[in-house]
Amino acid sequence: MSVHVNITVPAEHFAFESLPEEVRIELERCVPFDAELSPYLWLSGADDSRYVGEATELAGVDLVGEVDGEHLVRARWPPERPDVFGAIAASEAICLAGFRDRGVWNLTLRFPSTASVSEWYRTCPRSGESVTIRQIQTGPGCRTDRVSKLTDRQREALRVALETGYFAVPRETSLEGISTRLNISDTAASQRLRRGIENLIIDRFGDLRP
């Protein structure tokens, strides 16, 4: 049975420790057809892509394009990689999602079994110092899309809110209008919206609550 593990790793133990903390990096999702880590990265919080090009952890980098102030780059990974990076690459895990924010990487890994998780953590260099396990989820029903944590009712409430202009400026409908469409109380509609938005934020940035 597969296992999803969410971990945080300081950049110095994974990648891009030389970049300023304000530079945010996100791994581009893709379907791999070889054993290499996805070479595509989204870079934000920098004036241009030169920061990634200056990263000593890379063998090279090419600018692919820019969208809404974010830079998409293709990285060429060197054979020798930071310790935790190398341990993940040598394990049975695959990386489903990952981003670096404020100098810390948040990674979602999938392992084929709990035994493979234990083996990876046991062999991971300085695992107790460099890796923090935030969440472990077991089961075939685990999904990695960013709306997977939304309940059906939260998703419906967010869809109605978007369709009716609740998020528009100025608003085109009220909370009462949404509750009427959903045939629920104003309080229930408010809770579904707040919890749905919270789940989306956690999926995007990780659970940053203390």
Image: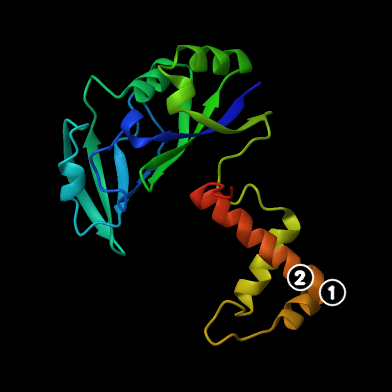
Question: Relative to the observer, which residue lies in front, 197 or 103?
Answer: 103
Measured along the vertical axis of the image, is residue 205 above or below residue 162? above
**Label 2 with label 1: CB-CB less than 8 Å:** yes
Residue labelled with disc 2? 189
Find the distance from the CA under tag 2 to the CA under tag 1: 6 Å
At label 2, the amino acid type is Ala
Residue labelled with disc 1? 185
Note whether residue 34 is visible: no
SS for tag 2?
A: helix
Measured along the vertical axis of the image, is residue 21 above or below residue 181? above
Q: Residue at x 21, y 44 (%)?
A: 52
Badge 2, how many Cα within 10 Å: few under 14, some, many 20+?
many
Left or right for 60, reference 77: left
Q: Residue at x 80, y 72 (%)?
A: 187
Image x and y of residue 179, in percent: 78, 76
Left or right for 3, reference 50: right
SS for tag 1?
A: loop
Measured along the vertical axis of the image, is residue 152 above or below residue 17? below
